[in-house]
Image (spheres, rainbow, N blue to C red):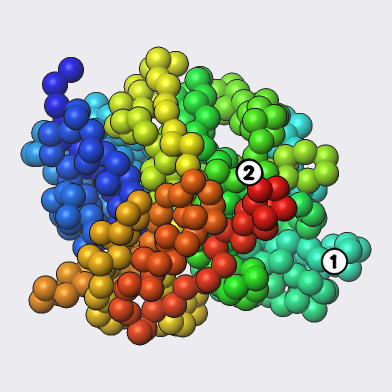
Amino acid sequence: MGKINVLIIGSGGREHSLAWAIAKSPMLEQLYCNPGNAGMAQVSTCVELDTDNHQAIIDFVVDKKIGFVVIGPEAPLVDGLSDSLQSVGIMAFGPSAAAAQLEGSKAFTKDLCAAHSIPTAAYRRFKEAAPAKAYLQTKKMPIVIKADGLAAGKGVIIAEDLRQAEAAVDDIFNGQFGAAGSELIIEEFMEGEEASFFVLVDGKHCLALASAQDHKQVGDGDVGPNTGGMGAYSPAAVMSEDMCALTMREIIEPTVKALNQAGTPFCGVLYAGLMITAEGPKLIEYNVRFGDPECQVLMMRLKSDLLPALMATADGSLADITLDWHGQAALSVVMATRGYPGSYDKGSTISGLDQAGNRENVTVFHAGTAQQNGDIIATGGRVLNVTALGATVSQAQSRAYGAVDAIDWPQGFCRRDIGWRAIEREKRHPQ
C-alpha cells in the first residue's frame, strides 16, 4: 500500500496528540489539520475550513488527494460529517450521525441501555420543569441532573440537596446549555470510582484500547465546577484485566450488537465513561470520540502505528489489527486560562514551552493556542496538556509537574494533584 495524505478535523489537545501519533506513521505522506493550533502546526499543514460546510471539506479533500479523514470532536460527528464524506467515497474515521446519537442524546443511550439490560444508573427523562421537580421530591440526594444534548463536557450537575437539584432543572430549561437543554435526564447518584475505557469498533469487531482516569472538577481534591477535564492518567488501576473483560462483555459488546441490529452500525472509537461500583462496572455515559485529555495519555503509551488501526476501523478490517502498549504509566496535566471554566481573557503570551517539551519523556500537547508575531498565545480555556511517561504514576506525575514549572505563563493555572488516587494506591501497595 502506498503512502497516504490525511486530514484531521479539530483544534484541541486530543487532535494534537492524534496528529503527533499519525505524523510518526511510515504510511503518512502529508498531514493536514483543520483548523489545528500552534502545536499541530509543528507536525502538519494547518488550514481554515468551515467544518459545518461539508461540501467545502469534500472539495479540499479531493483537491489535496487526501485518502483518509480523522474527525476528532463530537459536534461534526453528530452533524453527520462522516456520512457526508463516506457518501462520496472518502474514507473517514468516526461514526455516522445515527450511531453518534450515543453521545448526541443521553436519553437515546439510556433508553438503549434499558432495552438491552446494559448496567447503568436508574433514570427518568423530562421535557418540562414541573414534573422534573415533582420527581425530585421523591428521590434521595445526592442526585445527578444532565442536559440531554452536547454541552462540551459541562452539562452534568451533581446536586447535593433538593434546592441545588431544583436550581439545576431551572438552569437547564432556562438555556444554560442552549439547545442541549431542551430535555433533561435525572438519574441516581452512583457510588464508586470513575474510569474511562476506550474501544475501537468497525461495526462488528471490537479492539479494546487502554483505560484512563480523568479529573473533571476544576480544583485540587476534586472540588469546584465540572470542566472538560483538568488532567488524566493511564492505565486506571481500578480497570483490572477482569474489570476490562466484564466491561466488554456487559457494556460494550451489547451496545455494538444493538446498534448493528438497528441498522446503524457503530464505526469509530467508543469511549465508555464508567462507574466501578460494588456490583461491577456501570455505564455513566458514552462518547463517540477519543477523550480530551485521555487521548493524550493513550497516545503517549501507544507503541504501535496508530494510522493503520484507525483505517482498519473505518474499512471494517479491525479483526486483523493488534496494538502494543508501553507498560509505563502516562499522566497529563491541563494548563488552563485563569477564570476557566467561567469567563476568561484570551491573548496572553506563553513562553518556556521548548524547555518543558525537551525534558525526558515529556510532550506538551497544545489545545487553545495560536501563533502571533512569533509568540505562542492562549486562545481558549484549556490551553496546554503537559504529558509525561514514567515507570509509575508517581514518576509520571513528577515529570509532568517539573515540565509545568518550566512554563512561564502567569495567566495560566493547573491542578497540582492529577493522579492522586493512583498515587495513594501506589503508596499502599508499593511494587
Q: Position of residue 223 (x, y in %)?
A: 65, 73
Q: Residues within 10 Å of mark 1 (few under 14, many from 20)?
A: some
Closer to the camera in the image, 43 or 89 = 43
Q: Which mark is drawn over residue 16? A: none
- In the rendered image, the residue lying farthest to the top is 320
Closer to the camera in the image, 99 or 40 = 40
Q: Seen in the image, is 167 located left or right of residue 356? A: right
Residue 167 against residue 293 in the figure, above or below? below
- In the rendered image, the residue lying farthest to the front is 431
- Residue at 83% in and 40% down: 279
Closer to the camera in the image, 393 or 317 = 393
Helix, strand or loop at mark 1: loop
Residue under pointer 2? 431
Helix, strand or loop at mark 2: loop
Check the picture and name the quadrant holding the N terminus. Answer: top left
Report the label total.
Answer: 2
Q: Which amino acid type corresponds to the residue marked 2 in the rendered image?
A: Gln
- In the rendered image, the residue lying farthest to the right is 138
Q: Seen in the image, is 402 located left or right of residue 207? A: left
Residue 297 against residue 302 in the figure, above or below? below
Q: Seen in the image, is 116 located left or right of residue 19? A: right
Residue under pointer 1? 141
- Residue at 76% in and 32% down: 117
Q: Position of residue 114 (x, y in %)?
A: 75, 37
The quarter of the displayed image where residue 236 is located: top right
Asked whether residue 136 appears in the rendered view, the answer is: yes
- Residue at 66% in and 48% down: 430
Q: Position of residue 283 (x, y in %)?
A: 68, 43
